[in-house]
Image (cartoon, helix red, strand yellow):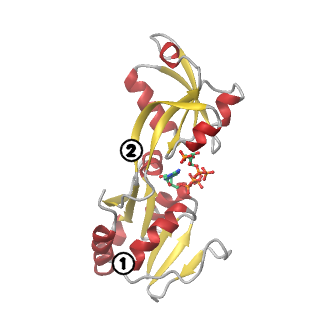
Amino acid sequence: MITLALSKGRIFEETLPLLAAAGIEVLEDPEKSRKLILPTNRADVRVVLVRASDVPTYVQFGGADIGVAGKDVLIEHGGEGLYQPLDLKIAKCHVSVAVPAGFDYAYAVRQGARLRVATKYTAIAREFFAQKGVHVDLVKLYGSMELAPLTGMADAIVDLVSTGNTLRANNLVEVERIMEISSQLVVNQAALRLKQAQLRPLIDVFAQASPKN
Ligand code: ATP
Ligand code: PRP
């Protein structure tokens, strides 16, 4: 049995065509079903639905053999115990620093200043500002980062941006782009050895079927 960990929403939706290329069809719609383990048309493949940020943990500890996780999530997790053979080039976005329109960011990050930054991505933010030599006080949040500067709780946020619509709707502007993000295929290291015969062909089909840029 191969167990694939996916999160509901964009990662599930964008992984479906890759599964289809491998002849795998998920038999239940996660938006309609309350089930956490979904069967597929292949008796030897099942999908487990987990939070996006839990995918690396499930694969690391063998709750799943393979999974699909954003680079953002993998950096925050640390990637221990995971083999990352393939950039699937799906769920593309970037991680950026954003501030309220009119906020003087250049002044706020001058030498010797401190910046209060709200984010779910503390590892990425810590590393980025350390490289710049900017002192930051990080405020860890689990969602709706945009609200933090609007309520005065932070000067800036580090968050995912795709179309920019969420920032615009909240009168925030992107001031620095930290990194490009896409989703990676992650594989449990022991499973890759023990289930090679089943996993290798799947990885090869995903590589061929994933978007080319
Ligand atoms: P969790 O449920 O663990 O808090 P989440 O709500 O961030 O996670 P999703 O919104 O489904 O989960 O995002 C899953 C992944 O998709 C992210 O880790 C990121 O790599 C990517 N992603 C997030 N937002 C966007 C977006 N607006 N456009 C494209 N890709 C995105
Ligand atoms: C993500 C992210 C941003 C938004 C950016 O949220 O956290 O808020 O997308 O995308 P945009 O630039 O195209 O507006 P998402 O829509 O996944 O909501 P969630 O974090 O509540 O799941």
Q: Which of 100 and 207 is in front in this view?
A: 100
**54 sits to left or right of 153:** left
Q: Nearer the viewer, residue 207 or 44?
A: 207
Residue 143, image x, y percentages: 63, 45
The answer to whether mark 2 and mark 1 are in CB contact below 8 A is no
Does residue 99 sit above or below 105 in this rendering?
below
Q: In which quarter of the image is the C terminus?
A: bottom left
Label 2 crowd (10 A; few <14 / some 14-19 / many >=20):
some
Q: What's the residue at 65%, 42% (across, down)?
A: 144
Neighbor class of circle 1 (other Cα within 10 Å; few <14, some 14-19, many 20+) is some
Q: Determine which residue is flagged by label 2.
A: 180
Secondary-structure class at tag 2: strand
Q: From the Cβ of disc 1, is ligand 1 less than 8 Å away?
A: no
* Residue in view at x 29 percent, y 61 percent: 212
Name above or below for residue 86 compared with residue 175: below
Q: Quadrant of residue 59?
A: bottom left
Residue at the image position 50 percent from the left and 62 percent from the top: 11
Q: Earlier in the sequence, mark 2 or mark 1?
A: 1
Asked if residue 62 can be seen in this view, the reply is yes
Gap between marks 2 and 1, in whole Å? 26 Å
**Residue, disc 1:** 21
Disc 1 marks which amino acid? Answer: Ala
Give the amino acid type for the residue marked by disc 2 in the picture: Glu
Q: Does the residue labelled 2 lie within 8 Å of ligand 1?
A: no
Q: Quadrant of the N terminus?
A: bottom left
Q: Quadrant of residue 34?
A: bottom right
Q: In this view, does 87 lie above or below 146?
A: below
Residue 104 in picture, x, y percent from top left: 54, 16
Q: In this view, does 72 lie above or below 172?
A: below
Q: Position of residue 10 (x, y in %)?
A: 53, 61
